[in-house]
């Protein structure tokens, strides 16, 4: 497959967007964020969609717990050439300059490993409970400061669900819902109080999935008032919400130890 590399980010175009949305980002409540529609030329994303891996392909990392049911792919070697080109543009100096101008956060560092990012996919019934993101890159030893999520869902209807919900600091109410429609970019600050997720099971048709690209940006340090100590993803419960283990976890707990050991032995022989 030939890759159309004619698309590249241009500072003059991006800087005009940064200037347009800068104040909106910095004053947004309950934490800094902004939604920008029609962010890329649609033809660029058509190429990404053409090679987007199907859910049943074996390279996806599968999350299946009471707090998240989703698929993730961070290994660029398993992605198509157009996707790799677009991701590289999001990690380019030009785009980093845009993010600095938009957010006011200087000395940003992109992640060549797409740790926790890359491609994400949620099938019908999947979800991601409200959470605050991990705040340090363990491999690069950097502070995570910004998220950029580009949604890839054409003709996505309100009734399909999958809205990204933005919750207040105290987890008392949802402040905003963002529908994951095609070519919509969401940028938000990675803070311990940045509670977000799509906690309700996806209700799209069985032949659809909620698809996105996720990029994270880091700095060598963060302001003192934001320092809370290193942590992994911190899930938050909504009012009245209770988490229960999924069927697979429940079966594991109820099964006699001898059966659990036998299953582990079979899996180890397969690998």
Image (tube, rainbow, N blue to C red):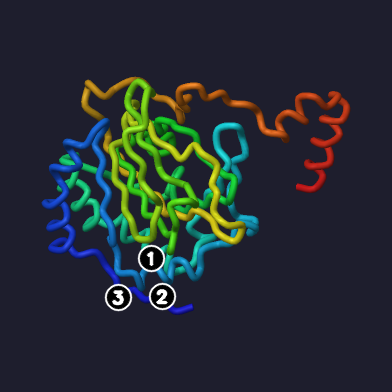
In the visual, does 222 lie left or right of 195?
A: left
Q: How far, Cα to Cα, is label 1 from label 3?
A: 10 Å
Q: Nearer the viewer, residue 184 or 139?
A: 184
Q: Nearer the viewer, residue 202 or 96?
A: 202
On residue 6, which mark appears? 3
Q: Secondary structure at mark 3?
A: loop
State the image quarter where residue 93 is shown.
bottom left
Q: Nearer the viewer, residue 220 or 204?
A: 204
Would residue 52 be seen by someone viewing this image from the given angle?
Answer: yes
Q: In this picture, is 216 found above or below 54?
A: above
Q: How far, Cα to Cα, is label 1 from label 2?
A: 8 Å
Give the residue pinned by disc 1.
85
Which residue appears at 19% of the width and 52% of the height? 97
In the visual, does 70 lie left or right of 150?
A: right
Q: Secondary structure at mark 2?
A: loop
Give the residue pinned by disc 2.
3
* Image location (x, y in percent) of residue 40: 30, 64
Q: How far, Cα to Cα, is label 3 from label 2?
A: 9 Å
Q: Earlier in the sequence, mark 1 or mark 3?
A: 3
Tell me the crowding category of disc 3: few under 14, some 14 to 19, or many 20 or more residues within 10 angstroms, Cα based: few
Which residue appears at 47% of the width and 55% of the height? 211
Which residue appears at 37% of the width and 34% of the height? 141
In the visual, does 160 lie left or right of 169?
A: right
Would residue 106 be seen by someone viewing this image from the given angle?
Answer: no
* Image location (x, y in percent) of residue 8: 27, 68
Q: Secondary structure at mark 1?
A: helix
Tell me the crowding category of disc 1: few under 14, some 14 to 19, or many 20 or more residues within 10 angstroms, Cα based: some
Tell whether label 2 touches label 1 (CB within 8 Å): yes
* Image location (x, y in percent) of residue 51: 51, 68
How many marks overall? 3
Tell me the crowding category of disc 2: few under 14, some 14 to 19, or many 20 or more residues within 10 angstroms, Cα based: few
Q: Residue furthest bottom?
A: 2
């Amino acid at each position: 497959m030939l890759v159309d590399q004619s698309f590249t980010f241009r500072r003059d175009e991006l800087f005009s967007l940064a200037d347009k949305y800068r104040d909106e980002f910095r004053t947004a409540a309950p934490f800094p964020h902004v939604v920008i529609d029609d962010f890329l030329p649609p033809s660029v994303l058509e190429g990404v969609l053409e090679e987007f891996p199907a859910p049943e392909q074996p390279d996806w990392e599968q999350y299946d717990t009471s707090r998240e049911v989703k698929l993730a792919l961070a290994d660029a070697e398993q992605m198509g050439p157009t996707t790799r080109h677009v991701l590289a543009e999001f990690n380019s100096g030009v785009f980093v300059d845009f993010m600095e101008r938009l957010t006011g956060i200087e000395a940003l560092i992109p992640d060549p490993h797409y740790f926790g990012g890359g491609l994400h996919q949620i099938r019908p019934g999947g979800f991601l409970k409200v959470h605050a993101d991990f705040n340090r890159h363990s491999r690069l030893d950097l502070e995570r400061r910004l998220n950029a999520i580009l949604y890839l869902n054409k003709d996505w209807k309100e009734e399909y669900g999958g809205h990204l919900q933005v919750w207040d600091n105290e987890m008392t109410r949802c402040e905003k819902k963002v529908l994951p429609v095609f070519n919509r970019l969401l940028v938000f600050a990675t803070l311990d109080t940045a509670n977000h997720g799509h906690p309700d099971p996806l209700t799209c048709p069985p032949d659809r999935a909620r698809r996105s690209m996720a990029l994270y940006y880091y700095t060598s340090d963060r302001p003192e008032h934001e320092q809370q100590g290193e942590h992994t993803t911190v899930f938050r419960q909504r009012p009245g919400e209770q988490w229960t283990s999924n069927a697979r976890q429940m079966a594991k707990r109820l099964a006699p130890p001898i059966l659990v050991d036998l299953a582990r032995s079979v899996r180890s022989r397969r690998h």
